[in-house]
């Protein structure tokens, strides 16, 4: 089979949407760090639509992989072209697929192979925006506070070798230094990761690192560059071999790395761009003065339920989130958690009806055409749980409100870390802090072994675990929190996930 490429574009079936502009006229205005599926199925799609509508072609994208050459290797032979498949079900419940070839990606650089090429690309006069989807762990931050983890191996490396950085933060700091030295204008740094106040967080981390390398550089960045906050939302699971085969078959040419996603897409961005920006609103993005309420909505009302379902499912042997939510007690549980315990912490958000939003989220997760693996969502819990669940719990405890369901979500994570239900096997914990987590669990078990009363022993296990301050902050020492979590971890271990959730739902 021939490859998807500029030469084979004209052979694609009519129903496949193609770039609506002349690719040869594109300039590389955007450098994107973390060229994974999410960026290719979200920002790049909006960017393509904006360029096609406005005719402003200064916004081609140069993608950067910090480590793995896989995306570059797959897309090089396709000149950066790839397919986005939108998978939904039609009115009769049958799967419906819409294919679109995205043209805005010019090339992919691999930082671990050629760091100079990456730094020079950002320090190029055409570059105006550096955007990022490097996942939560790519920010080298303390989970509870968002501060720079100065002891992190990558950061230690980048402080010693500022000219040849490995971390995203190090790449940004060094390339901004080159721009400053060359008298080039500043750029906008745009985080598109699921972090609270992601722009402010990125700014704080970049400045903290720059300050240690050269305080004058830190002042330049602080005065010249902007870091808008942004909320991003689209379910984009990892592409499977079956997706590759099906999409290539439909195209009539081989696409080595297409991306699959739902039709839902949200992008709410603060309009603070120091070097211009594409007309992304023409592609469905919204520009606002403050993204904060939308970010909170996303983390607490989309990501928290997704993580909760993933831990319930992964620890009871269910492979994908759509199957977890198809189980009635799990669905009722997450619905109740959202309605009773999360929604009241969200306040009023302009233009958002929380009941409608909740129903739509549950339907999005249930989409059978787009299975999202529980293990994929469950990974990197230390990097996700604080902003997805713990902030909400802390807010509720401050207001003296119940945390019955939220504490079960945290307990489900702990249950998952401990190996899940009896009989569930075959997964390992994928988390940058996995060793620390395992150590805390072992310490808790050892201390609990001294206690004869099972309730005291369970409380002890949980208290040792949640005393991990870098993750739980002060919340980890709050007796109400420890008691609530311990009640659930014990039931989960003794009865398993299904019975724990089912009995909670009949209890109320
Ligand atoms: C998911 C997200 O993998 C995960 O942790 O919760 O990727 C989620 O699907 C997106 O944030 C939805 O916008």
Image (cartoon, helix red, strand yellow):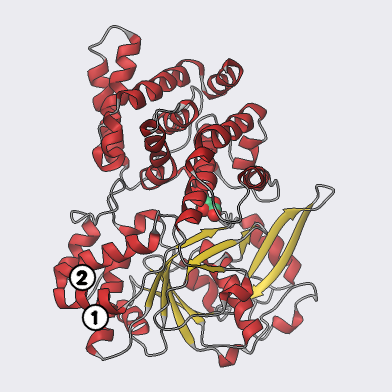
Residue 244 badge: none
Report the residue at 30% width, 44% height from top.
433
Residue 488 seen from this side: yes
Please tell me in which quadrant of the rendered image residue 388 appears: top left
Tell me if 254 is positioned left or right of 442 in this view.
right
Tell me if 196 is positioned left or right of 297 in this view.
left
Residue 146 picture location, percent across and down: 29, 53
Residue 121 picture location, percent across and down: 37, 83
Report the residue at 51% width, 83% height from top.
59
- Which of the image's four quarters has the C terminus? top right
Furthest residue toward right: 92
Image: 148 above or below 422: below
Q: Are marks 2 and 1 in contact (CB under 8 Å)?
A: yes
Marks 2/1: CA–CA distance: 9 Å
Q: Which residue was labeled with disc 2?
A: 210
Q: Residues within 10 Å of mark 1 (few under 14, many from 20)?
A: many
Residue 39 picture location, percent across and down: 51, 66
* Label 2 element class: helix
Report the residue at 24% width, 38% height from top.
469
Residue 82 seen from this side: no
- Residue in the foreground of this view, choosing between 272 and 84: 272
Q: Which residue was labeled with disc 1?
A: 177
Tell me if 308 is positioned left or right of 467 in this view.
right
* Label 1 element class: helix
Query: Is the CB of the residue bearing disc 2 within 8 angstroms of ligand 1?
Result: no
């Amino acid at each position: 089979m021939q490859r998807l490429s500029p030469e084979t574009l004209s052979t694609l079936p009519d129903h496949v949407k193609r770039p609506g502009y002349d690719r040869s006229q594109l300039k590389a205005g955007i450098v994107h760090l973390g060229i994974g599926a999410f960026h290719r199925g979200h920002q790049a799609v909006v960017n393509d639509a904006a360029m096609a509508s406005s005719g402003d072609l200064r916004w081609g994208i140069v993608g950067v992989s910090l480590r793995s050459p896989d995306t570059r290797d797959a897309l090089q032979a396709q000149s950066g072209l790839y397919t986005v498949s939108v998978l939904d079900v039609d009115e009769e419940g049958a799967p419906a697929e819409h294919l679109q070839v995205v043209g805005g990606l010019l090339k992919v650089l691999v930082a671990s192979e050629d760091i100079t090429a990456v730094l020079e690309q950002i320090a190029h006069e055409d570059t105006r925006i550096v955007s990022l989807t490097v996942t939560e762990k790519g920010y080298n931050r303390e989970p509870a506070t968002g501060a720079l983890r100065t002891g992190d191996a990558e950061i230690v490396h980048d402080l010693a070798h500022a000219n040849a950085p490995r971390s995203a933060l190090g790449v940004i700091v060094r390339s901004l230094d080159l721009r400053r030295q060359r008298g080039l204008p500043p750029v906008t740094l745009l985080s598109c990761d699921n972090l609270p106040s992601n722009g402010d967080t990125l700014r704080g981390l970049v400045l903290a690192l720059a300050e240690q390398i050269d305080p004058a550089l830190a002042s330049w960045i602080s005065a010249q560059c902007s870091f808008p906050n942004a909320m991003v939302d689209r379910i984009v699971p990892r592409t499977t071999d079956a997706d590759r085969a099906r999409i290539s078959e439909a195209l009539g040419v081989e696409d080595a790395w297409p991306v699959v996603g739902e039709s839902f897409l949200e992008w709410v961005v603060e309009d603070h761009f120091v070097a211009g920006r594409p007309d992304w609103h023409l592609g469905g993005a919204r520009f606002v003065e403050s993204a904060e309420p939308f970010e909170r909505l996303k983390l607490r009302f989309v990501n928290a339920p997704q993580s909760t379902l993933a831990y319930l499912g992964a620890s009871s042997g269910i492979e994908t989130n759509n199957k977890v939510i198809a189980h009635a007690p799990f669905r009722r549980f997450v619905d109740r958690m959202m309605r009773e315990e999360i929604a009241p912490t969200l306040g009023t958000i302009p233009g958002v009806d929380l009941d409608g939003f909740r129903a739509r989220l549950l339907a999005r997760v249930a989409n059978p055409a787009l299975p999202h693996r529980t293990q994929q969502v469950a990974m990197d819990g230390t990097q996700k749980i604080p902003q997805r669940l713990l902030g909400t719990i802390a807010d509720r405890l401050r207001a003296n409100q119940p945390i019955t369901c939220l504490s079960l979500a945290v307990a489900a994570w702990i249950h998952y870390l401990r190996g899940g239900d009896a009989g569930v096997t075959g997964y390992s914990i994928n988390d940058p802090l996995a060793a620390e987590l395992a150590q805390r669990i072992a310490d808790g078990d050892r201390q609990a072994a001294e206690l004869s009363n099972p309730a005291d022993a369970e409380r002890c296990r949980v208290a040792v675990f949640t005393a991990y301050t870098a993750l739980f902050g002060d919340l980890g020492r709050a007796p109400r929190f420890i008691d609530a979590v311990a009640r659930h971890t014990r039931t989960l271990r003794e009865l398993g996930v299904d019975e724990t959730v089912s009995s909670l739902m009949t209890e109320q």
